Amino acid sequence: MSTPDTTPAASPSDAHPRFAEALGELGLEVEIRRFPDATRTAAEAAAAIGCELSAIVKSLVFEADGAPVLVLMDGSSRVDVELVRQELGAGKVKRAGADLVRETTGYAIGGVPPFGHRTKTRVLADRGLLDHPVVWAAAGTPHTVFPLDPTSVIKHAGGTVVDVREQSE
């Protein structure tokens, strides 16, 4: 007997334990979806969920003058590092390596949720996330996602709404 491609709803225990704990602390009850195949990329997640690529929240860690900063970006867009640098007033901004991502958030790349991290980090949320009534984000593992309205995602992440998306010429 074959298993279906998706599980309609998984229990919060399917989320990473740290993330499940964060949901409890915030009093949030969200649907956790677990997929048999990894949804590490925004494209994989959108295909598995059946939503627009732009309805996926990418939780990306950067280093701004050596300090980690989380940028929440819609799945169809790229972060303009220069705009992040200007927003932060930093001298240098670059993508964080896998070790710093795990050290800062407690999660591996491909499963980083927008909140419930190991350490408190400055969070920038691109305004494009607000274009959707519901967005989907990682629930702490490369196999789990959850839906939530973007305003709540940004609020729970402690994010500041900014414009840091690469603009097409």
Image (spheres, helix red, strand yellow):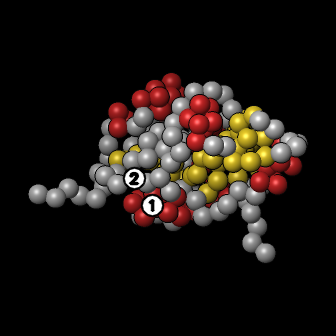
Q: Which is more toward the observer, 65 or 12?
A: 65
Mark toward the start of the polypeptide (2 vs 1) = 2
Residue occupying the point 76% across, 58% down: 80
What x and y, as percent, mark residue 165?
A: 73, 59
Residue at point 40%, 37% (across, down) = 15
Which label number is shown at residue 38? 2
Q: Residue at x 45, y 60 (%)?
A: 44
**Position of residue 147 measured from the top left corner of the image (x, y, whole percent):** 47, 48
Question: What is the C-alpha distance between the residues marked 2 and 1?
Answer: 7 Å
Q: Are marks 2 and 1 in contact (CB under 8 Å)?
A: yes
Is disc 1 placed on a helix, strand or loop? Answer: helix
| Quadrant that contains the C terminus | bottom right
Q: Quadrant of the N terminus?
A: bottom left
Is 39 on the left or on the right of 148, as rendered? Answer: left
Residue 44, numbered label: 1
Task: Locate residue 135 relative to residue 16 in the image: left or right.
Answer: right
Local crowd at mark 2 within 10 Å, few (<14), some, or many (≥20)? some
Helix, strand or loop for disc 2: loop
18 or 9: which is nearer to us? 18
Q: Is residue 95 above or below residue 18?
A: below
Which numbered dot is residue 73? none
Give x and y (percent) for residue 135: 53, 53
Neighbours of disc 1 within 10 Å: few (<14), some (14-19), many (20+):
some
Type of residue at label 1? Glu
